[in-house]
Amino acid sequence: MERTIFLQHYRVRLRSDGTPRELSRDDAAITYEAVDERSGDPVDLKLIPVETIDSGVREQLDEQARAAQMLRHVNIAKVFDFGREGGDFVCVSEHLPGETLAAWVAAHGPMPADAALRVAEQIVSVLSSASFHRLPYPPIQSSDIIVVPGQTPEGSWPLVKLINFGLPALTSGRELKPEDSETREQPTSAEQSASPRSDTLLSSDRRCTFG
């Protein structure tokens, strides 16, 4: 990696051998563990080569990223900053502890019906807010949903947050390696062999399945 500082303030974290701490990879898009040098807070920094973005999407990308940055919702990972540097589009977002819903199902089996319903309610709340702000959204996969520690504002479990929301060109499967992050998990062979129903949680027709 030739550079480690992006958008002036965000530094990609390196391992002891000098290689960057990679969180996830989806085709050309790579998400790294980074830090905001102004505050010291951890962030996720996603790089995607501009040349790999469809030209039609490319023209709308800044506008959609700006809309996502302005959207504040308890169930959406915050977008802190975005821009273009060199040949890459850069998106900086909230770093979330926890694991993807896909990894949770792989480790624990199907989620109990009442908990699955609470997940669905949180996702529907996000979509309602996005619709109100006229923010487009892609089909939501179980790898786009992070089960984070803690409880919902109502005091129930689980609390979930969506990542990459409102950025269709940047949607990334959250298939993480244990050696790359202490707080997120790599999908297991059980997850990879799971029924396709456990992968697609919410598409444009708002169907949802949980394991």
Image (cartoon, rainbow, N blue to C red):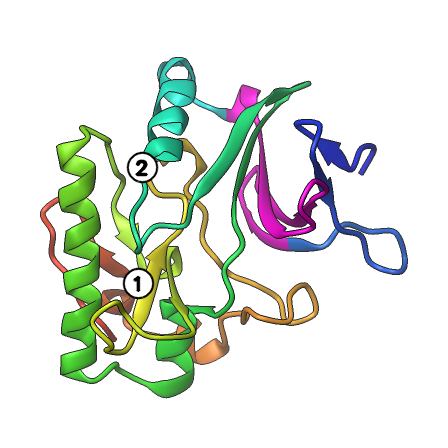
Quadrant of the rendered structure where residue 176 is?
bottom right
Seen in the picture, residue 127 relative to 188 is either above or below; the reply is: above
What residue range appears in magenta? 23-52
Q: Please state the horizontal and vertical placement of residue 71, each as a whole percent of the image.
A: 31, 37
Residue at the image point whose x is 35% and y is 32% from the top: 70
Compared to residue 197, the image places residue 40 above or below, namely above
Residue 202 within the magenta-colored segment of the rendering: no
Q: Which residue occupies 21% across, 56% down?
A: 123
Compare marks 1 and 2 and give the one earlier in the sequence: 2
| Residue placed most toward the observer, 83 or 200 | 83
Alpha carbon of mark 1 to alpha carbon of mark 2: how far?
Answer: 26 Å
Residue that mark 2 sits on? 71
Instruction: Name the side, left or right, on which 147 lies relative to 28.
Output: left
Percent position of residue 41, x then y: 63, 52
- Residue found 32% across the figure and 85% down from its top: 109
Judge the density around disc 2: few (<14), some (14-19), many (≥20) Cα neighbours within 10 Å. some
**Labelled disc at residue 199:** 1
The three-letter amino acid code for the residue at tag 2 is Leu
Label 1 crowd bin: few (<14), some (14–19), many (20+), radius 10 Å: many
> As shown in the figure, which amino acid type bears the numbered disc 1?
Asp
Q: Secondary structure at mark 2?
A: loop
Q: Is residue 162 left or right of residue 200?
A: right
Furthest residue to the right?
A: 17
| Horizontal side of residue 12 vs 16, given as left or right | left
Main secondary-structure element of the magenta-colored stretch: strand
Is residue 28 rendered magenta in the image?
A: yes
Q: Nearer the viewer, residue 205 or 84?
A: 84
Splitting the image into 4 quarters, where does residue 100 fall? bottom left
- Indicate the position of residue 82 as horizontal and vertical percent values: 52, 28
